[in-house]
Image (cartoon, rainbow, N blue to C red):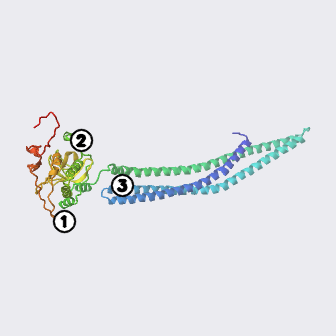
Amino acid sequence: MSRAPDGVSKLTESTYKNVMDQFNPGLRNLVNLGKNYEKSVTAMTLAGKIYFDAVSKVGENAMVSPVSRELGLVLKDIAETHRKVHNELEENFKRFHREIIIELEKKTEMDVKYMNATFKRYQSEHKLKQDSLDRSQTELKKLRRKSQGKHSSKYEIKENEYMETISSRQMDMQKFIADGCREALLEEKRRFCFLADKHCMFSFQISSFYEKAKEMLAVKLLSWQEKCSDITKVPDTVENMIEELSTTPEQSPLLERCNRQNNMPPPAPPLKAQISPLANMFDPEPRSPLTSFSDHNSDQGSLGEDSLSRSTSLSSGLNAGRKQRVRTIFPHTAGNNDTLLSFDDGEVISLFIHEEKDGWLYGELERTKQRGWFPSSYCRPYSEPVISNSMRSLSVANLPEQYEEAEPVLIPPPDYSDNVPSRRTLPSIPSPQNKVSLVNGTAKAPFLGGGNPFATVKLKPTVTNDRSAPCI
């Protein structure tokens, strides 16, 4: 930094220009931005109040619930605490507007006029003093030109007077420049100090606000967290109510009878039915009971297709309305599952669902009339033989076919309903030659009864052309 009067004077002028061209416009910008800041904080506090009003309403809804009543109180307390915090923030920004924004706006308008006038006064005074100094130096130069070659004391006295005048005016000029520079720098510092002091005060207010907000929130925060720590905790009254409702009521007999009439089975067990380890011992290639049952019926339906077509059709007509049945070959225990069926081996079960579901069948145990699901591998098809009251008629022409069958075809009794006319079945009398013996009600072939199986074979006479045969 130059210490010459001209350098100091330039520093003074630049200081004044800095205040007028940069600081004062900066203050105007701060005023505008401060107003926007205040508006944004006001909008934020308003939005915060609206938000926490909604939180309070949610808390009121939670208070209606017997389980969430405490949480509803927590939500209302949180909303009220934050509402107080936003009110404190609003008060601090009202002071910010009153003590900073308004003051800066006033100071800026006044300072622009003041700094312009001060700078002009400094420039005018500096010019007057500089002009006076310049005139004194000019007059001294003229006097010296006149006194050249002359040794008069008169010129020496005037020259000394001019020298004293110039020296005094130079000292006055330097003092003026120094005082002006000091004043300009102090004016600049005074303005920055004012701005910093105002914002220090605002920072102190904001710090007090945050400390107060922290105290308001920290006092209640632990109690709020305790209420939310255990989500599974419910009041004792609600716990008792839930325990009373959790007990399974007994099924009404009327409902059970209605379900039995409507044949509405419970859902099948989710796990696949287990296969008995002994099933392969009796059946190397186990088949589904329903498949075996249908195959068995198809085999029986093919018996006597040519000779006993009417008997077979009548038998199938009578069995059409009967349910399929199976006989158990292993015992099964249901355990605690009410939807499963317990039984011993050798019992008969009537099927209500003919299709397996993951290896399960649904039916009714004929001995106890209980219904439930059971593994299909624990049973085999069962068909009870039907004993006819009428005599069995066997055609002699079909004896070879009956010899090949393991069991005879059983003719069902006639249908005596109104829709089918009654017919009388006349037993056919077998010929003495082809007589069939009955053992325990089962037709047996003659040779199985002890007779000669070739008794009915007639030999044909033979003729020989042997010339060596003797003539009789």
Q: CA distance from mark 1 to mark 2?
A: 45 Å
Q: Earlier in the sequence, mark 1 or mark 2?
A: 2
Asked which secondary structure carries label 1, the reply is loop
Q: Which residue is mark 2?
A: 285
The amino acid type found where label 3 is placed reads Val
Q: Earlier in the sequence, mark 2 or mark 3?
A: 3
The nearer-to-camera label among 3 and 1 is 1
Q: Are marks 3 and 1 in contact (CB under 8 Å)?
A: no
Asked which secondary structure carries label 2, the reply is loop
At x 78% / y 42%, what residue is drawn?
167
Q: Earlier in the sequence, mark 3 or mark 1?
A: 3
Q: Are marks 2 and 3 in contact (CB under 8 Å)?
A: no
At x 13% / y 61%, what residue is drawn?
424
Quadrant placement of the N terminus: top right
The nearer-to-camera label among 1 and 2 is 1
Q: Give the numbered dot on residue 239.
A: none
Residue extending farthest to the top is 468
Q: Nearer the viewer, residue 65 or 127?
A: 65
At x 39% / y 49%, what residue is drawn?
218
Looking at the image, residue 335 sits to the left or right of residue 429; the answer is right
Neighbours of disc 2 within 10 Å: few (<14), some (14-19), many (20+): few
Q: Give coordinates of residue 319: x percent, y percent.
A: 19, 56
Asked which secondary structure carries label 3, the reply is helix
Q: Which residue is mark 3?
A: 74
Q: Give coordinates of residue 364: x percent, y percent.
A: 18, 53
Q: Which residue is mark 1?
A: 419
Q: Give coordinates of residue 359: x percent, y percent.
A: 25, 47
Q: Nearer the viewer, residue 59 or 90?
A: 59
Q: Is residue 461 above or below residue 301?
A: above
The amino acid type found where label 1 is placed reads Asn
Neighbours of disc 1 within 10 Å: few (<14), some (14-19), many (20+): few
